Amino acid sequence: MDLKLLAIVTVLAVAAAPSQGKPISLVERCYCRSTVNSLPRGLIRELKFIHSPNCPFQVIAKLKNHREVCVNPEMPWLQQYLKNAIKKMKKSKQAN
């Protein structure tokens, strides 16, 4: 095999190999594309809060049936939950 042909085949093989990182378009994509506007608190097992430079504040609820849904962060009970959590954090900092 010609040395130039071998070099070209090697370069093409390396370029075609899948990379370990995600493409930029996937990295910049927001996790929550749509949100649930009503969700009983009794179904929620865990809440995750995500904020990134490219996406607005996102709330992901892990349900007791192991599904994950995006919750509208403007829901009144969630707003109250966040206010209570902030107050609790401030009190614990003042106690220390």
Image (cartoon, rainbow, N blue to C red):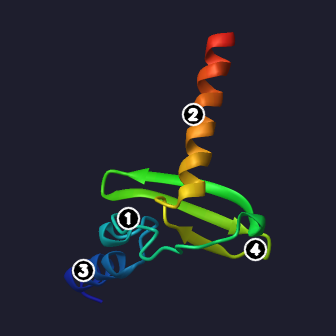
The disc, 3 or 4, on the residue closer to the chain's N-terminal end is: 3
Q: Are marks 1 and 3 in contact (CB under 8 Å)?
A: no
Q: Amino acid at mark 4?
A: His
Q: CA distance from mark 3 to mark 4?
A: 55 Å
Mark 4 element type: loop
55 with respect to 75 (left or right): left
Q: CA distance from mark 2 to mark 3?
A: 66 Å
Total marks in image? 4
Residue that badge 2 annotates:
86
Residue that badge 1 annotates:
27
Q: Are marks 2 and 3 in contact (CB under 8 Å)?
A: no
Q: Are marks 3 and 4 in contact (CB under 8 Å)?
A: no
Mark 2 element type: helix
Q: At 28% across and 76% down in the image, what residue appears? A: 11
Residue 29 picture quarter: bottom left
Residue that badge 4 annotates:
66
58 with respect to 40 (left or right): left
The disc, 1 or 3, on the residue closer to the chain's N-terminal end is: 3
The disc, 2 or 3, on the residue closer to the chain's N-terminal end is: 3
Q: At 48% across and 59% down in the image, what residue appears? A: 73
Q: At 59% across and 23% down in the image, what residue appears? A: 90
Quadrant of the drawing holding the N terminus: bottom left
Mark 1 nearby-residue class (10 Å; few <14, some 14–19, many ≥20): few
Q: CA distance from mark 1 to mark 4?
A: 24 Å
